[in-house]
Amino acid sequence: MAATTCASVQLHSVSRWSLSFGKRSMDLLASTAGLVIGFPVIAAIAALIFLSSGRPIFFRQWRLGRDGQKFQLLKFRTMAANAKANGLGVTRSGDTRVTPLGRWLRKWKLDELPQLLNVLRGEMTLVGPRPDLEEFWSLASTKDQAVLALTPGITGAASLAFCDEERVLAAVPPGRLIGFYLEELLPRKARLDLDYAGRATFRSDCDILLRTLFLPLTRCRTPEVRTR
């Protein structure tokens, strides 16, 4: 997997900002400030998860990062403790594995807060393509795998464009779910993120972060995608 990724890095140009020391400095400052200032909220969410559904508090899953390197993505657990063994690698609206508290956390994007630790450790960035499972990327085209040349992010261009992804997946027949994700959604998201990386700036990253913060308060509609 890593060899394929490294070969495709040269096929796509990115902006200076995308791989700059300035972007990494922004990540360090923002993630540190977010963890310190947000600690009371993080602690409260952890307590609510423990009281409502026990342990584990966090969801950890191996994802592919920059240059195809594996890392453990962190989230607050929003599903039943045995959900990993009982379901697919994608989630859609109405998924019975999601707990009542988990639905609320997902709505307000609060389940993503622990990823500030991933950012602090350099495994992720604030703005970049969302990290996905190796099993999905191994089936993607070489062209789409080029997105693995980038550091994955908490939010990004494709995250905003497909902000209502779970609703779109809910319209897909269960037996078609993984195929639909691989054939329709993953390629489109990869192309959006590659296009953004080629023109990204400090100002555009800040714009995406602000839009992400206000996203739960706005009406989110994903572009029309053929589901059948």
Image (cartoon, rainbow, N blue to C red):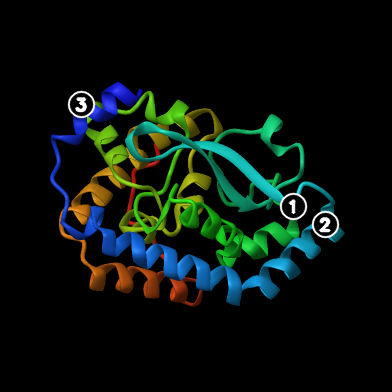
Image x and y of residue 157, in percent: 31, 58
| Residue 37 visible in the current orientation | yes
Name the kind of residue labelled 3 in the image.
Ala
Give the alpha-carbon distance from disc 3 to disc 2, as whole Å: 44 Å
Q: Could you say which disc has been placed on residue 131 in the image?
A: none
The residue beneath circle 2 is 50
Camera-side residue of 3 and 121: 121
- Residue 96 lies, in percent from the top left, at 70, 46
For badge 2, the amino acid type reads Phe
Q: Are marks 3 and 1 in contact (CB under 8 Å)?
A: no
Q: Secondary structure at mark 1?
A: loop
Local packing at callout 1 (Cα closer than 10 Å; few below 14, some 14-19, many 20+) is some
Q: Residues within 10 Å of mark 3 (few under 14, many from 20)?
A: some
Nearer to us in this view, 164 or 127: 127
Q: Pinpoint residue 129: horizontal percent, then vertical percent.
A: 35, 49
Which of pointers 3 and 1 lies earlier in the amino acid sequence?
3
The residue at the point 15 percent across, 41 percent down is 12
> What label sits on residue 57 in the rendered view?
1
Amino acid type at mark 1: Ile
Residue 80 figure quarter: top right
Which numbered disc, 1 or 2, marks the residue that appears first in the sequence? Answer: 2
- Dot 2 falls on a residue whose secondary structure is helix
Q: Which mark is residue 7?
A: 3
Cα–Cα gap, marks 1 and 2: 6 Å
Q: Quadrant of the C terminus?
A: top left
Q: Which numbered disc, 3 or 2, marks the residue that appears first in the sequence? A: 3
Q: Disc 3 and disc 1: Cα gap in Å?
A: 38 Å
Assign a secondary structure to mark 3.
helix
